[in-house]
Image (cartoon, grey):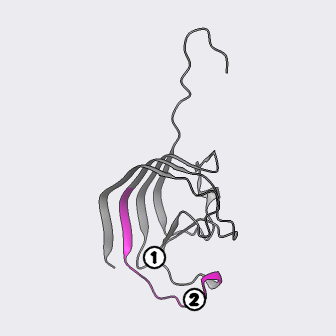
Amino acid sequence: GKTGGGNVVFRNIRVEDPFPTCQAFFLTTAGDIPEMGNDTEKAGQGLTGVTFQNISIAASSVLGYSDILRGHPEAPISNIIFHNVKIADKFVDSLDHFTHVNKYLTNIQFRIPALECSPGSEL
């Protein structure tokens, strides 16, 4: 299948809305997410080479929509980096953050900045 993306960076984004209705990340190339009213196996375009860096989002969806990361056999998702991404003051640090995760995801990376300490400071 076709693949979209490649060296795309979303950087230094702050979302301050304390009551967002939708989820922050809806990354899917599959059309089989029942909660979205779609039960087809139709594939979209694959996605590769996208970095989300230094992103701060004030809150999760007030309607309870989870962040989604889901590929399709004909349109996989690969080489995605979440670097210093926070939602509601919590780092997005693993695939456990997302729902609808499947085996059509490869090389999904999570990077958390090291805590910076000055000499003599305590954590």
Q: Which residue is mark 2?
A: 38
Pick the residue in front: 65 or 106: 65
Tell which circle, 2 or 1, labels the residue nearer the N-terminal end: 1
- For the record, the magenta segment spans 35-50
Tag 2 near tag 1, CB within 8 Å: no
- Amino acid bearing label 1: Thr
Of 119 and 71, which appears nearest the observer?
A: 119
Along the viewing direction, whichever of 115 and 18 lies nearer the viewer: 18
In the shown orientation, is residue 75 left or right of residue 15?
A: left
Dot 2 lies on which element?
loop
Query: Would you place residue 122 above or below residue 96 in this image?
Result: above
For the residues carrying marks 2 and 1, which lies nearer the camera in this image? 2
Q: Quick check: 26 left or right of 75?
A: right
Image x and y of residue 85, in percent: 52, 48
Q: Which residue is mark 1?
A: 29
Q: Looking at the picture, how far across and down is residue 50, in whole percent?
A: 37, 58
Q: Residue furthest top?
A: 120
Q: Residues within 10 Å of mark 2 (few under 14, many from 20)?
A: few
Query: Residue 2, which numbered label?
Result: none
Q: Quadrant of the N terminus?
A: bottom left
Tell me if residue 54 is in the magenta stretch: no
Describe residue 118's horizontal placement relative to residue 6 as left or right.
right
Residue at point 48% right, 55% down? 108
Q: Amino acid at mark 2?
A: Asn
In the displayed structure, would residue 21 be above or below residue 16? Answer: below
| Label 1: element kind | loop
Q: Residues within 10 Å of mark 1 (few under 14, many from 20)?
A: many
Magenta stretch: includes residue 42: yes
